[in-house]
Amino acid sequence: MTASQAHAGSPGGGPPPAAAPGAAARRSRAPRRPTWSQIWAAATVLTIAALLLAPGWLAPSDPYHLDVSQRFQPPTAAHLFGTDDAGRDIFSRVIHGARYSIGTSLVVVTAAALFGTVYGAAAAWFGGAIDRVLMRIVDVFLAFPYLVFAMAISASLGRGLTSALIALVSLWWPSYARMVRGQVLSLIKDYHVRAARTLGASGPQILRWHVVPHTYDQVLVRYTLDLGQALIALTGLSFLGLGAQPPTPEWGLLIADAKQYALTAWWAAVLPGCVVFLVTLNFMSLGDRLRRRGGLR
């Protein structure tokens, strides 16, 4: 290669101009545009927060107002989801019912995740006979079909939303306990846990600061996925008459009350059912995106 060929890439035959020293740093500090998944996740959280905290701002009318003259009105601009057999606005009842359906599902999964995490971490940490006894209790809960088990607990405690909540928490915590136990068993062998033990940290301190926080990623993914499943289970119990009771505008109860009018007023059951489907699909998709982003199985 000749000297002219070597310097052909720069004007005047000199070396190519070097990038400014701070250019890479400025590019790294430049604000990144939010992705569509981030926008969608933020919109989901804001919508759910609005439904739970201020349903009256979104609902066009009182969900308990009776107007028999307007019974079984099809969907129109005045009644987006039509009216039911008592003339109540179904859209308003769906909006207010989110506090019972989604709110109860959040309570169920949160309580199950907290108790299951503590239970599974304690079983793995103590090990030995304590671990075997605690995990045999988990196996007893997991041995029953989940819906039959929830129905049995709800029926024994009496019909109502509180009974359904207790039944679903009893159903959900064992899966978290088993998952967290497996993670803790692998984490307690890591070098950072050994170092903390060598430096004199107590068992509760090691669990709190060096073990349990490393389980949060998988618990969060599982938590998001379980919200949709808990919503389906809750609406199923209410549909069977074991959950919320009239006149509560819970979504499963709305569908149960309208099933006898499915041929004459299809909107009364189909549109609330579509809302349950879309909300469940949203939760499941969000959990799946978190799982893929974190590289979790």
Image: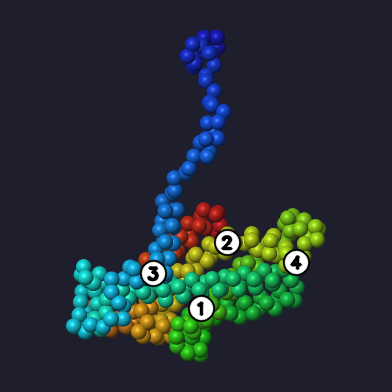
- Give residue 291's position: percent from left, percent from top: 52, 58
In the picture of the structure, the residue carrying the numbered disc 1 is: 168
Q: Say whether marks 2 and 1 touch (CB < 8 Å).
A: no
Q: Nearer the viewer, residue 112 or 281?
A: 112
114 sits left or right of 60 in the view: right
Please tell me the numbered disc located at residue 54.
3
The residue tagged with tag 3: helix, strand or loop?
A: loop
Closer to the eye: label 2 or 4? 4
The mark tally for this picture is 4
Would you name the residue on which mark 4 appears? 203
Check the image and report above or below for 210 versus 74.
Answer: above
Q: Nearer the viewer, mark 2 or mark 3?
A: 3
Marked residue nearer the N-terminal end (2 or 3): 3
Q: Position of residue 280 (x, y in %)?
A: 41, 67
Report the quarter where the C terminus lies: bottom right
Instruction: Point out the tag, 4 or 1, that comes first from the N-terminus.
Output: 1
Q: Which residue is most to the left?
A: 69
Q: Position of residue 158 (x, y in %)?
A: 47, 90
The three-letter amino acid code for the residue at tag 4 is: Gly
The answer to whether one can see residue 175 in this image is no
Residue that mark 2 sits on:
218
Q: CA distance from mark 2 to mark 3?
A: 31 Å
